[in-house]
């Protein structure tokens, strides 16, 4: 159960991050503001953190605390999803 939750949240995080990247890439460079660049830079840092969390879980095979890593990883990834959703709303709000 914990592994399914983790992989579901990890997949959701990847899809939402890709959605953010696509949305940013569709905005003409001349229309991007300094805050948009800050949003993109922050998202890139969050993507690296998500990548690290996923790899820790992948490489923890055989580790006795792996179920705990699944739950902690799912929590961290859910938090990152929330941050990405906020950035998406911020980016969409400034472009309308």
Image (cartoon, grey):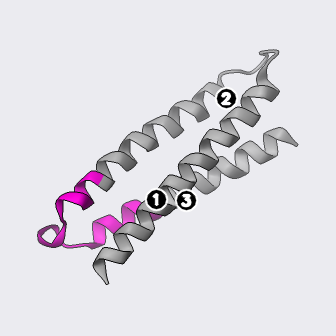
Q: Position of residue 30 (x, y in %)?
A: 11, 70
Q: Are marks 1 and 3 in contact (CB under 8 Å)?
A: yes
**Residue placed farthest to the left in the image?**
30
Q: Which residue is mark 2?
A: 57
The quadrant holding residue 64 is top right
Q: Residues within 10 Å of mark 2 (few under 14, many from 20)?
A: many
* Magenta stretch encompasses residue 36: yes
In the image, which residues are magenta?
18-38
Tell which circle, 2 or 1, labels the residue nearer the N-terminal end. 1
Q: Residue at x 52, y 60 (%)?
A: 16
Residue 61 is tagged as none
Residue 15 is tagged as 3
Q: Residue at x 83, y 39 (%)?
A: 2
Classify the position of the C terminus by image quarter: bottom left
Q: Which residue is mark 1?
A: 18
Name the secondary structure under disc 3.
helix
Q: Main secondary structure of the magenta part?
A: helix
Q: Position of residue 89 (x, y in %)?
A: 44, 70
Label 2 to label 1: alpha-carbon separation: 21 Å
């Amino acid at each position: 159960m914990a592994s399914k939750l983790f992989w579901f949240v990890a997949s959701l995080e990847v899809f939402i991050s890709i959605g953010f990247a696509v949305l940013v890439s569709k905005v003409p460079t001349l229309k991007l503001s300094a805050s948009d660049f800050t949003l993109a830079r922050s998202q890139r840092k969050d993507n690296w953190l998500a990548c690290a969390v996923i790899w820790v879980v992948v490489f923890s095979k055989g580790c006795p605390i792996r179920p705990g890593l699944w739950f902690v990883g799912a929590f961290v990834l859910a938090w990152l999803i929330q941050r990405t959703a906020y950035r998406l709303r911020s980016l969409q709000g400034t472009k309308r």
